[in-house]
Amino acid sequence: MDEARTISAADWSARKAALHQAAQAHRGTIQDRLLGPMESWVANSFTEAQLLELERILAAPASSRLPIDLRLTVPFFRRRFFLTFLAGTERRSAERLKEERAKHRLWTLANVSFFIFLLVLFVPTVIGLVHIFAIGN
């Protein structure tokens, strides 16, 4: 066996204790984000190893594999809004896409209002740029 890969019982115990301590520190986060809405008997049924794995998965950014990942916070009067634009290859199954389309409708009042707002900003910008470049040439 490779010397670098051999772990003594003491090292293993120290690593296990560190993982346990990390799990305890992050348990509040797990409970708030995932376990909080669950029935208590289900939430209490998770083992320490399962909680550690859930924390690892929740801590990893889901969009880290996407080629385009833009996240902005925009102040608007006294409030702050966030904009997220993600793009990449579609990996979701047809069944999941169907479920998400039913759950998150595209043509809502808020979405249509936002699209109109973007058009109001975008069209004059493009016309202005075309005008600037046409005069410049």
Image: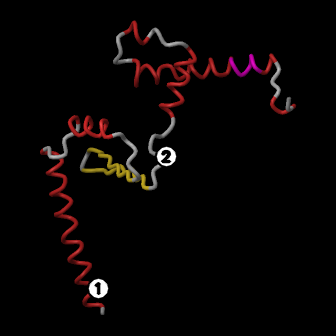
Q: Is residue 58 left or right of residue 71?
A: right
Q: Amino acid at mark 1?
A: Phe
Q: Position of residue 66 (x, y in %)?
A: 45, 50
Q: Position of residue 76 (x, y in %)?
A: 26, 50
Q: Amino acid at mark 2?
A: Ser
Q: Position of residue 56 (x, y in %)?
A: 54, 29
Give the dominant element type of the magenta stretch: helix, strand or loop: helix
- 27 or 69: nearer the viewer: 69
Density class for disc 2 (Cα within 10 Å; few <14, some 14-19, many ≥20) is: few
Disc on res. 133: 1
SS at circle 1? helix
Q: Please say whether residue 13 is one of the residues in the magenta stretch.
A: yes
Q: Position of residue 94 (x, y in %)?
A: 31, 40
In which quadrant is the N terminus drawn?
A: top right
The quarter holding residue 8 reads top right
Query: What span is colored magenta in the figure?
Result: 12-16
Q: Vertical placement of 110 versus 122: above or below? A: above
The residue under the point 35% across, 52% down is 85
Q: How many numbered marks, from 0 up?
A: 2
Q: Please say whether residue 63 is one of the residues in the magenta stretch.
A: no
Sequence-first disc among 2 and 1: 2
Disc on res. 64: 2
Q: Is residue 51 left or right of residue 40?
A: right
The residue under the point 12% across, 45% down is 109
SS at circle 2? loop
